[in-house]
Image (cartoon, rainbow, N blue to C red):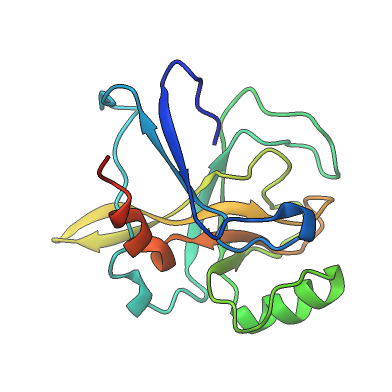
Amino acid sequence: VWVPDKFLYTSILHSRGTDHQKDEFLNDIALVRLRSPIHFNDYVKPICLPIDVPSFNLTNRWIEVAGWGSTKPGEGSFVSDVLQSLKLKINPQSYCHSLYYKNQGITLTTSNTTLICAGDVRGEDTCRGDSGSPAVMVLTADSLPRYYLIGIGAFGQKFCGSGKPAFFTDTSKYIEWILDNLQP
């Protein structure tokens, strides 16, 4: 996620961060500290962290993804002037490993559980420019529907819209790290 320098105080990368040169998309997560507090309104609101989500089976549940990435299938570099959103169904890990990792030469192993993959419908996908975008799910807490940050856009096919899943960093696996780094 890009934050203009005038708002950014500092950023905190995960200590075992991603080396995109090796296609190892593990621990692809960071926090930003802003210079001043955010003022919430009808369009800017906080989101819940999935502290209790690891106990849920997320397979076949729906997430909503929002981003400013390309809206054209293929590799294109066009970005949207309008925030786009899409609902994607979370796939079983075994499906993602067999379909994606093996065919794309990604170095992830089937024991990796820090990623979620979702979607596999041709033409419905995240695209170039959507990395870092939120993947949210509405869950009930205290008898109220609340939005939870389930994932953060990590990577997908080189040619988006091809009917292969997109991958998201599973935020529930980083709760301890997030909480440890919230205070200055």
- The residue furthest top is 6
Location of residue 178 in the rendering, given as x and y in whole percent from the top left corner? 35, 54
Tell me: residue 81, above or below residue 171.
above
Please tell me which residue lies in front, 73 or 127: 127
**Residue beneath the point at 71% across and 29% down:** 79
Location of residue 8 in the rendering, given as x and y in whole percent from the top left corner? 43, 25
Please tell me which residue lies in front, 121 or 39: 39
Quadrant where the C terminus sits is top left
Q: Is residue 102 left or right of residue 90?
A: right
Quadrant where the N terminus sits is top right
Which quadrant of the view contains residue 41?
Answer: top left
**Residue beneath the point at 81% across and 32% down:** 77
Location of residue 165 in the rendering, given as x and y in whole percent from the top left corner? 70, 64
Tell me: residue 137, above or below residue 112.
above
Which quadrant of the view contains residue 17?
Answer: bottom right
Q: Is residue 16 left or right of residue 32?
A: right
Location of residue 153 in the rendering, given as x and y in whole percent from the top left corner? 58, 51
